Image (cartoon, helix red, strand yellow):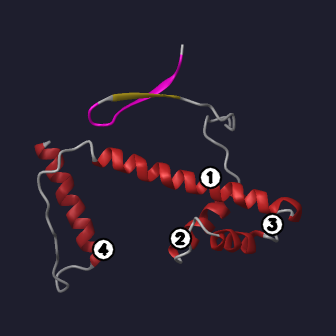
Amino acid sequence: MYLCKIYNDGSHYIAKPIIESGKKDSDGKSKRTDINEMIDNLFVTGLRQGLSYKKAEMFNFIKDNTESIIEADNIDEFVTGHIDRCRKNLFLRKRRFDRKAFLHKWTHFITISYDDKIHTEQSFKKSLKKCLSNLSTRRG
């Protein structure tokens, strides 16, 4: 018996086998260390600063900020492995988003704007989300 995750890409059902990584704690969740979280945060910070995740800029940025924490003999392979993991996760998130976006037929396009005198950006986003939430729950 195989365990699979099944999803619909819009026209076909696709089953992917579930692969266990073996790095689980007692709750069944993946174990995360402080170093992993720190490198993930540095990766996101680097992207926000305009560094390319495909170039040596990101490697040097993360390596410079973690040299004092990670042992010097394996820092290059450790950082490279984490950058590869972050790149793969980013790619998979984008692919998942594309699959969800293309499940629907797009029939309309709207542009929404707001008056600065009435709303700030945050209050407008909040009221728009509330409006769309009410529409989707009341009208399906």
Q: Earlier in the sequence, mark 3 or mark 1?
A: 3
Q: Is residue 34 visible?
A: no
Q: How many marks?
A: 4
> Residue 23, how many percent across, how many down?
69, 38
Residue 56, x across and y down, in percent:
66, 70
Mark 3 residue element = loop
What distance separates the C-alpha of mark 3 from that of mark 1? 19 Å
Q: Where is the C terminus found, in terms of image quarters?
A: top left
Q: What segment carries the magenta color?
A: 2-11
Question: Which is nearer the eye, 22 or 102?
Answer: 102
Q: Which residue has dot 1 on it?
A: 85
Instruction: Tell me the CA gap for discs 3 and 4.
Output: 38 Å
Residue sitting at x 54%, y 29%: 18
28 up-or-down from 127: above or below: above
Front in this rendered view, residue 35 or 103: 103
Say left or right for 102 vs 46.
left
Quarter that holds the N terminus? top right
Q: Are marks 1 and 2 in contact (CB under 8 Å)?
A: no
Q: Where does label 4 land, which residue?
A: 122
Dot placed on the residue nearer the N-terminal end, 2 or 4: 2
| Amino acid type shown at disc 1 | Arg
Which residue is the site of mark 2? 47
State the separation of the CA atoms marked 3 and 2: 22 Å
